[in-house]
């Protein structure tokens, strides 16, 4: 039976793929978006679940207003670099943010015009040129914007991107500042209880004072498989919309890795369980997608092309039959 939701997949080398029936059948997007390009980020607009933004390396931005069926290019200056992340302001959806390698960009008119952000990022890091893996608008105050950088720590703006502070030193080595995932967890109530959560190759870092101090959690390794590390290499961290107690982290033995797993917490990150998957992930679980209109549904993707779906808030998972080459992005949106 077809599911009433759409899954979008962004790949390295094979562009965009969309399924409008929950993953049973797939359509390769050929028009406007390069079918052999790299799509590293997909974003569903908060004010319209059928409006989706996609970015493609050295090609720029593309948008769909019909849940990923037809796509049109957005003019932008971001056509000469790798593009790694996107964010849409949930209070003011006209304000968009793009994280590239190595710069950030902002639009205040829903993508018609763009300006480069002066973030003060280092031009070189242990992997060469740093890349902005996450742009996050703070749910407590939409003028506060966070950027996670691989490998250059976390940057924070309090004025919508005009000026930035650099938060580094999350751990003892430069690669503790290798930010793969970044999110803001706001507890129930008046919003005063909040945590900044970042994932790195060493695990998960949490700050309850906006990045002044961090506590670390490692996740169990893979019993000698792949890299053989005692701890899991972590990628993205995600919070279920409307349920701040449910967090999920995608991990693996390394990147791209030979083994992967999904860590799930239902108590705000105090305790974690490695989720049950009907098929073992074939590499690091790279990214996940949820949507507030689809409670309990989570889609997770591995680097080497698997798509796993959960209908119970991330506790158990089923792998879809279709597999891809290399995946870097996923989005989820309702059909209705």
Image (cartoon, grey):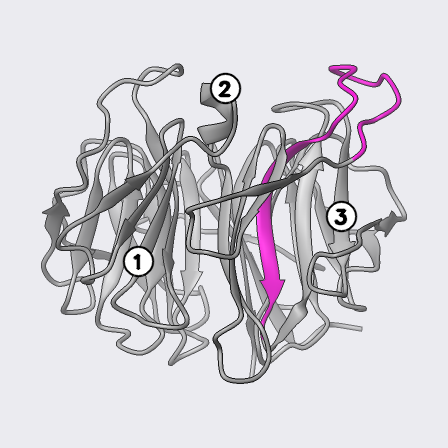
Numbered badge on residue 145 = 1
Q: Which residues are magenta?
A: 220-241
* Mark 2 residue crowding within 10 angstroms, few (<14) / some (14–19) / many (20+): few
Quarter placement of the C terminus: bottom right
SS label for mark 3:
strand
Q: Is residue 152 visible?
A: yes
Query: Who is closer to the viewer here, 27 or 80?
Result: 80
Q: Which mark is residue 199?
A: none
Please identify, in this view, whether the residue under mark 1 or under mark 3 is nearer the observer.
Answer: 1
280 on left or right of 202: right
Q: Between marks 1 and 3, how big is the CA–CA gap?
A: 26 Å
Query: Mark 3: few, some, or many residues within 10 Å (few <14, many ≥20)?
Result: many
Q: Secondary structure at mark 2?
A: loop
Q: Which residue is denoted by mark 3 in the rendering?
A: 263
Displayed quadrant of residue 27: bottom right
Residue 121 horizontal/vertical position (percent): 23, 32
Residue wearing tag 2:
173
- Magenta region includes residue 198: no
- 29 relative to 89 in the view: left or right: right
Marks 2 and 1: CB-CB under 8 Å? no
* Vertical position of residue 259 compared to residue 270: above or below: above
Spatial separation of the CA atoms under disc 2 and disc 1: 25 Å
Q: Residue at x 28, y 32 (%)?
A: 101
Camera-side residue of 1 and 317: 317
The residue located at (71%, 73%) in the rendering is: 3
Give how far across and how far down residue 31 sits, in percent. Answer: 34, 51
Mark in front: 2 vs 3:
2
Q: Residue 302's quadrant in the figure?
A: top right
- Secondary structure beneath disc 1? strand
Task: Give how far apart the Cα atoms at labels 2 and 3 are.
Answer: 24 Å
């Amino acid at each position: 039976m077809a599911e009433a939701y759409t899954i979008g997949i962004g790949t390295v080398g094979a562009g965009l793929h969309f399924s409008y029936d929950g993953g049973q059948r797939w359509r390769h997007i050929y028009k406007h978006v390069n079918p052999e390009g790299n799509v590293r980020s997909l974003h569903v607009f908060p004010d319209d679940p059928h409006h989706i933004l996609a970015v493609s390396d050295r090609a720029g931005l593309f948008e769909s207003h019909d849940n990923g069926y037809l796509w049109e290019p957005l003019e932008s200056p971001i056509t000469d670099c790798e593009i790694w992340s996107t964010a849409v302001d949930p209070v003011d959806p006209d304000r968009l943010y793009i994280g590239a390698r190595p710069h950030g960009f902002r639009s205040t008119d829903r993508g018609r015009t763009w300006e480069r952000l002066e973030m003060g990022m280092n031009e070189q890091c242990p992997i060469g040129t740093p890349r902005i893996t996450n742009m996050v608008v703070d749910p407590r105050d939409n003028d506060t914007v966070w950027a996670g950088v691989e490998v250059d720590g976390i940057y924070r703006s309090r004025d919508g991107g005009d000026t930035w502070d650099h938060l580094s030193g999350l751990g003892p080595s430069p690669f503790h500042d290798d930010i793969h995932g970044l999110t803001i967890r706001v507890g129930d109530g008046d919003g005063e209880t909040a945590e900044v959560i970042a994932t790195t190759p060493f695990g998960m870092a949490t700050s309850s004072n906006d990045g002044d101090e961090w506590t670390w959690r490692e996740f169990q390794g893979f019993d000698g498989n792949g890299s053989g590390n005692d701890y899991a290499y972590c990628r993205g961290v995600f919070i279920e919309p409307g349920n701040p107690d449910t967090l999920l982290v995608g991990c693996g033995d390394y990147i791209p890795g030979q083994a992967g797993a999904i860590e799930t917490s239902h108590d705000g990150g105090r305790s974690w369980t490695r989720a049950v998957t009907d098929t073992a992930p074939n590499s690091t679980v790279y990214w996940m997608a949820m949507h507030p209109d689809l409670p309990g549904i989570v889609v997770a993707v591995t680097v080497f092309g698997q798509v796993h779906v959960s209908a119970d808030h991330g506790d158990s998972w089923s792998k879809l039959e279709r597999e891809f080459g290399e995946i870097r992005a996923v989005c989820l949106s309702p059909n209705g």
